[in-house]
Image: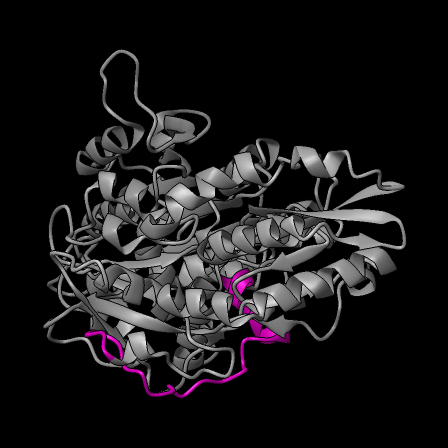
Amino acid sequence: MPNGRHRQPSRARAALASPLGFAAAAVALIAVLSVAIPYAVRLAGCGETRYLRVAGALGIAPVLQAAADEFNDAGREYSGTCVYAQAAEVPPHRVMTELAGGGGGGSDVVPDVWVPESSAWVELARVSESGARTIETEPRSLASSPVVIAVPRGTEGVAATWESLLPEERPEASPLVMVDPNRGVPGMAAMQAVRRILGTGDAADTAMTDFVRDAQPDTAFGEIDPAGVYPAPGGAAPVAVLPEQAVAAYNAEDPRTPLEALYPREGTVSLDYPFVTAGDDPVVRQAADDLFAVLSGERYRERLRDMGFRDPDGAAPARLEGLAGVDPARPRTHDDLTGDALLSAVEDWNRLSMPSQALVLADVSGHMRADIAPGGPSRLEVTRQAALLGLTLFPDDTDMGLWLLSSGFGPTGREEAEGLAELGSSDAGSGATRREELQAIAEDIGVEGGQARLYDNILAAYETVDGSYEEDHINSVIVLTAGRDDGSSEISHQELVAELQDRFDPERPVTLFIIAFGDQPERGELAEIAAATSGTLSVADDPGEIGDIFLSSISRRLCVPDCE
């Protein structure tokens, strides 16, 4: 069920994607230093000049730049070819896309050396034929840092377990802050750990849907700077998923809100900052080896330790041993975030966080006057509750429309109360958002009487959504109904099923979710209608079930178009 927790103010979201404080100035300097070739070197008379392009994750970029400068100062020359290193911070997901051959209109220049936060990125890049051909298979680690759960020191009610990330396990109103799993391994690790806790099956998918819906509003699109999160700008302090190094660097600055790093007892992922070469040019490979030798020197290893990193083998430096909030002991780690588990974690997130286009059909026929159960609320009252609750579960970028169904509305048997538009958009005249307009309509829904013309309008709604199909959206029709057509439609049940089966396109799926209230003598027919589009029928006898039904319907996107 939705947990009803309050979200952080929107201004907190912007802070989540800000760069690590200690690196910001150095990264800004990279743009100037990394492209400058010393004037004296330009006159050295090299037969050929080559550039060793180095791309690194934000946290480690300052060290890469310093090593590149030292490499260049040495005037590296290989059989008459002079090589100069140029280092820059580039988000790992962008480099992975380029190395895998999927740049899609961006720069086609890929790095010769890549230092992402984790070898998980290397594995993702090597899934493609291009990546498998160009990326080395045994990268060398420069440093390490375990992924931890971070909370303000003294926080009660958060255990050292991945289960504490679930909405019902966190302190009341405490949001979860993590990097988008598409853009950071800590987010991938959190998704993979939560999936392992929840397991598989319909109930697990519903719980995973609740987790993603709860986490998505406070997800960052880059490395998280704890200083931008703590102290919380309003409400309860967040629970965050961070590299230990970020916690260490933050606590070293004596902040107002010091953090405690919790090491999940089930085990965690260790970021290994691999030094990866791409391509097979022997000159570039030799230059890359020399750059790695510079980075392997004690001066650079000590600099990484000073920044809060562990050694590649996981050993903690003296700085961590004396720093409150972190545990220098080697935490329990695992290598489970590879292969299918890695891809599944990202795919789960993408499917569940994907925007939606949904046309809602609300039955207001005479059948909606009946009580959902003896002595209980009417079907119409439960429909109203379901509509209002559903509006709280969909984000602002959802395209949503509303039709009311009754033969009392004339030949079509419907009133198209609102067409498809984003919930967060505003009406130019009233200034109200589409969400507010739909909430006002839902609160005033009354029984119109007559019959529902259910089958005709399900097909009309399906055609409407199919005709306005949105790529990269989940496209669906949601029906809130008493479940009775009573022969009021021009088409029969069998004809509707045949039409839907004929129109359903697995490459452009429009899915039908039917939520029927009360006793359902036509349950089998309704189930066939939903199944024709890889959708579901849910029958509600208890108003308290509505939240779970909505989440279960949303979780269906994990299997569409191949749902059983």
Task: Note whether 93 is above or below 420 in the view shown.
Answer: below
Foreground residue among 86 and 152: 86
Picture coordinates of residue 40, whole percent (x, y): 69, 36
- In the shown orientation, is residue 339 left or right of residue 411? right
> In the picture, which quadrant includes the C terminus?
bottom right
**Horizontal placement of 222 versus 248: left or right?**
right
Query: Magenta span has 442?
Result: no
Is the residue 309 above or below the residue 384 in the image? below
Locate residue 365, reporting x and y percent.
31, 41
Q: Is residue 361 above or below residue 527?
A: above
Residue 493 rendering spot, x and y as whole percentages: 56, 52
Give the main secondary structure, helix, strand or loop, of the magenta stretch. Answer: loop
Span shown in magenta: 322-348
* Quarter of the image that includes the N terminus: bottom left
Identify the image's colour scheme: rainbow, by chain, secondary structure or one colour. one colour
Residue at 34% x, 73% y is 148
Residue 258: image quadrant is bottom left
View extreme (top): residue? 429
Q: Is residue 308 visible?
A: no
Residue beneath the point at 54% across and 76% down: 337
Residue depicted at 39% across the width and 67% down the height? 208
How far across and down, in percent of the image, does residue 433 sit?
27, 27
- Judge by depth and name the residue closer to the eye, 315 or 46: 46
Q: Tell me: 448 left or right of 458.
A: left
Query: Does the rendering let one see residue 483?
Result: yes
Q: How many marks?
A: 0
Closest to the observer, 148 or 9: 148
Q: Is 336 inside the magenta-drawn segment?
A: yes
Q: Nearer the viewer, residue 287 or 140?
A: 287
